[in-house]
Image (cartoon, grey):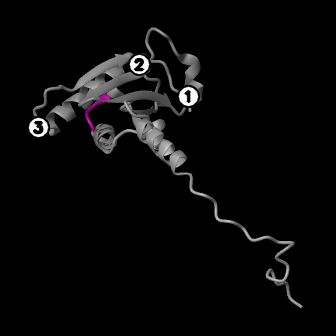
């Protein structure tokens, strides 16, 4: 005789559907909506990150900029990439991988080229201008309430022994 759960109902009681706790669900949804940024904030961050990465990659591919060294690749990292950004923190992180050690001059030159690209391609006149803030790790690009943190890293770890704190930027280690 095959197994029949109806005949064995005393031994194997049926599963009851779980009760819906509407109050708990409401509290969780309210807490989630307070922690996560609005769709407008998410769209503003995504747009600025896409433009920043596009412009940095175009700077890397252009010839005639010996003052910036050789850029290997541009990567989006951090909470924006992982989808864990919090409300009120309109911040995204971008890492530029360089072939040589990043100096403060290289960071400044890349930030100036990026600012020129934004000013040429962004024709909108806004109340809030594009602002570049130089930091020990690279620079911050602030525009329309969104901050893109651009840091520099290298792939050749053997070059780290040759760093000089007065010349080179603080490195981001992968």
* Relative height, residue 3 to residue 147 (above, below): below
Asked whether 74 or 12 is in front, the reply is 12
Q: CA distance from mark 3 to mark 2?
A: 31 Å
Residue drawn at (64%, 60%) of the image: 18
Residue 105: assigned label: none
Q: First in sequence, mark 1 or 2: give its number.
A: 2
Q: Main secondary structure of the magenta part?
A: loop
Q: How many marks?
A: 3
The alpha-carbon separation of the residues under discs 1 and 2 comes to 16 Å
Q: Quadrant of the N terminus?
A: bottom right
The residue tagged with tag 1: helix, strand or loop? loop
Q: Which residue is mark 2?
A: 103
Nearest to the eye among marks 1 and 2: give it.
Answer: 1
User: Could you say where residue 75 lies in the image, as x and y percent from the top left?
Assistant: 43, 40
Label 1 environment density (alpha carbons within 10 Å; few <14, some 14–19, many ≥20): few
Q: Of the residues under marks 3 and 1, which one precedes in the sequence?
A: 3
Res 173 label: 1
Label 3 sits on residue: 123
Residue 67 seen by the camera: no
Residue 120 vs residue 166: left or right?
left
Boundaries of the magenta span: 63-67
Locate the C terminus by quadrant.
Answer: top right
Classed neighbour count for the residue bearing mark 3: other residues with Cα under 10 Å, few (<14), some (14–19), many (≥20)? few
Q: Residue at x 18, y 26 (%)?
A: 128
Above or below for 162 versus 119: above
Q: Nearer the viewer, residue 129 or 5?
A: 5
Magenta highlight on residue 93: no
Residue 15 image offset from top left, x and y in percent:
72, 68
């Amino acid at each position: 005789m095959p197994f029949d759960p109806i005949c064995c109902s005393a031994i194997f009681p049926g599963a009851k559907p779980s009760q819906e706790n509407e109050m708990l669900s409401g509290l969780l949804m309210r807490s989630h909506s307070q922690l996560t940024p609005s769709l407008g904030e998410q769209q503003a961050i995504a747009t600025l990150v896409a433009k920043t990465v596009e412009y940095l990659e175009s700077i890397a591919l252009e010839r005639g900029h010996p003052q910036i060294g050789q850029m290997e690749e541009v990567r989006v990292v951090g909470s924006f990439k992982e989808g864990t950004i919090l409300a009120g923190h309109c911040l995204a992180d971008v890492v530029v991988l360089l072939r040589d050690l990043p100096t403060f001059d290289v960071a400044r030159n890349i930030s100036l080229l990026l600012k020129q690209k934004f000013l040429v391609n962004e024709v909108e006149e806004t109340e809030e201008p594009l602002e570049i803030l130089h930091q020990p790790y690279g620079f911050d690009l602030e525009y329309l309430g969104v901050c893109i943190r651009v840091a520099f890293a290298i792939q050749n770890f053997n070059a780290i022994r040759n760093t000089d704190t007065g010349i080179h930027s603080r490195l981001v280690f992968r």
